[in-house]
Amino acid sequence: MNVCDGSTTTLAEDESVESAVLRRLLELHPTRLTQEELIRELGGDGGGFAERDAVERAVRDLSAVGLLHRSERFVEPTRAALRFSDLLDR
């Protein structure tokens, strides 16, 4: 994720990571992942600080708008996110 190249904005990068996080959790549902497992899924080997921070922000922001449940242990899509996904797949 390179912000300095001028081709994308920070907002665009954040939205891209949010999209990747939500898509991956929807693909794996009903399997539940910890945040650490999700970071590994999206970053390969756990990634560096920037990748980890981006996923953590995405989980926080998606939880804030009601698309993810974040418990002490697991991260998973909400019923609303699952229903929306089902509707898109029709």
Image (tube, helix red, strand yellow):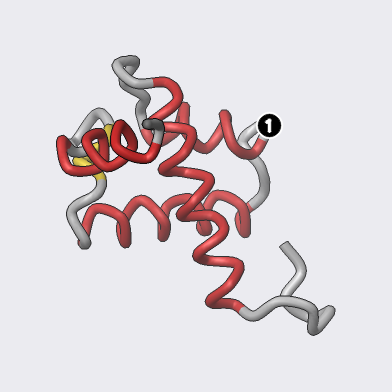
Residue furthest to the right in view is 5
Q: In which quarter of the image is the N terminus?
A: bottom right
User: Residue 65: percent from the left, percent from the top?
Assistant: 21, 61
Judge by depth and name the residue closer to the eye, 41 or 22.
22
Q: Where is residue 34 in the image (x, y as percent from the top left)?
A: 35, 28
> In the image shown, does 4 or 46 lie closer to the viewer?
4
Q: Which residue is drawn at 67% across and 49% down?
A: 48
Viewport quadrant of the C terminus:
top left
Q: Where's residue 22, x and y in %?
A: 41, 43
How many discs appear? 1
Residue at 60 percent across and 67 percent down: it is 13
Q: In this view, does 79 lie to the left or right of 39?
A: left
Q: Which is more toward the observer, 81 or 46?
A: 81
- Is 17 placed above or below 45 here? below
Q: Which residue is drawn at 41% across and 60% down?
A: 57
The amino acid on which the numbered mark 1 sits, given as a three-letter code, is Gly
Relative to 41, 80 lies left or right: left
Residue 84, picture quadrant: top left
